Amino acid sequence: MDDRFKARLAVEALRNGVPNREAVRKLGCNQPRVEGQFANMLDKVTDPLIPCENSQGMLVSGDFGTGKSHLLSYLEQLALSRGYVCSKVSISKETPLYDLGKVFLAAIENGRIPDKKGRFIEEIAHSLKPGSDQHTSFFHWTEKAAEEGLLSSIFPASVKIHELCHDQELLSEIEAFWSGDRVLMKTVRDGLKLVNQYEYFKVQAPKVTELPLQRLRFTIELIKAAGYKGWVILLDEIELMGSYSLLQRGRSYSEIARWMGKVEGESFPGLLFVGAVTDDFALEVISPSGRKKDWDYIPNKVRMNTRYFSLVPKLKIGMELLQKNCLSLESPSEKNIQDTVETLRNLYQLAFDWFPPAQEVQVGGAGEWGRMRYKVRSVINEWDLKRLFPDYNPEFVIDSYSTTYDEDTDLENSSDENEE
């Protein structure tokens, strides 16, 4: 892909308010506090003097259009350059926050590996080195985790099959299981017989409700066994949970506590998490003085549910984290804005072989005009019109947008996983 085509793709992405990797690389990051804290998290995971025994987590907040998605993409590129595997996931109807199984599948689907472009789990599996110390330690970990009830016995069995088997079809089925697909118990047992390991494993079907957490725990260790430093999960648009029902919001808060490494008895060394949320979420949804008053209502609602009542301590932690532990995005300075516009001018010239006139963009502004996304889109649209119609003086009007947090049951799309 030549430089002009890359520049054209970057400009088109910025025009639509969804920066791609090239745009993020060109524009960089104007959030030094967040970048510094994230870099410290990356260092902490691999610190030989103080082994990291749990996941590292960070929450960032900002208004709509202030650059949260851009920031997550920038952090993703930073982590990839440091030898981490990354997954950037947006909360949506297909990926509800309270459903760990769906979030896991989205993380697998959107996973990126340094200097590799193939399918996520397949590439990681191909990086394993059977017989190496890393691989041996990984297998022993799966055995111990299965003995302690942290994993189903199917996981160490699948690792042994993958290590010894040369049947490509069976290997693909094992890798598909690691990716989140179902696998027949007969397939696993036949695989063990094929590699003469059947007598050493007592394989039982895993419980459906326990599989998502086990898959997460297993995949983190699989990634490290393949030679990568850890798994970075970047979760965007957390504020959509504000439109869930009371029960599903409660479940979502407990998931925030888990991702942040704050649930007692659960540990995920090698996992790094960054979540992005709107800056008014805690006030509007959680606070007793807000619209929804989740702090008052949700614990009692969940406590009355026989299936989820045990989540109450976790969801309280999640709510408190969103209230007190969010790092607010900094407003861009005049220099930030002018530097960004100048970078855009050079990018636009490369993309269209036309150099835009110098543009003075003011800091701040009322409503949407104060947000970086709209400043970027407005200058690109103005250059488009001046390039195509040199005598035209454009004027722009933008519609306001705000998150309402109104309940929307269509966003609740959870379904249990059926494992045979």
Image (cartoon, helix red, strand yellow):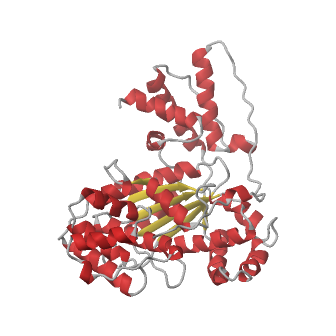
Let me know if residue 118 appears in the view: yes
Q: Position of residue 408 (x, y in %)?
A: 75, 57
Q: Quadrant of residue 82?
A: bottom left
* Left or right: where 291 falls relative to 52: right
Q: Position of residue 28 (x, y in %)?
A: 47, 46
From this view, report whether residue 19 is shown above or below residue 354.
below
Taking the spot 73% from the left edge, 79% from the top edge, the residue there is: 299
Q: Position of residue 226 (x, y in %)?
A: 28, 64
Let me know if residue 39 appears in the view: no
Taking the spot 45% from the left edge, 70% from the top edge, the residue there is: 420
* Left or right: where 408 falls relative to 137: right
Where, quadrant-wise, is the N terminus in this rendering?
top left
98 or 231, nearer to the observer: 98
User: Going by the picture, which residue comes out furthest to the top?
Assistant: 391
From this view, report whether residue 92 is shown above or below residue 101.
above
286 or 118, nearer to the observer: 118
Q: Position of residue 230 (x, y in %)?
A: 37, 66
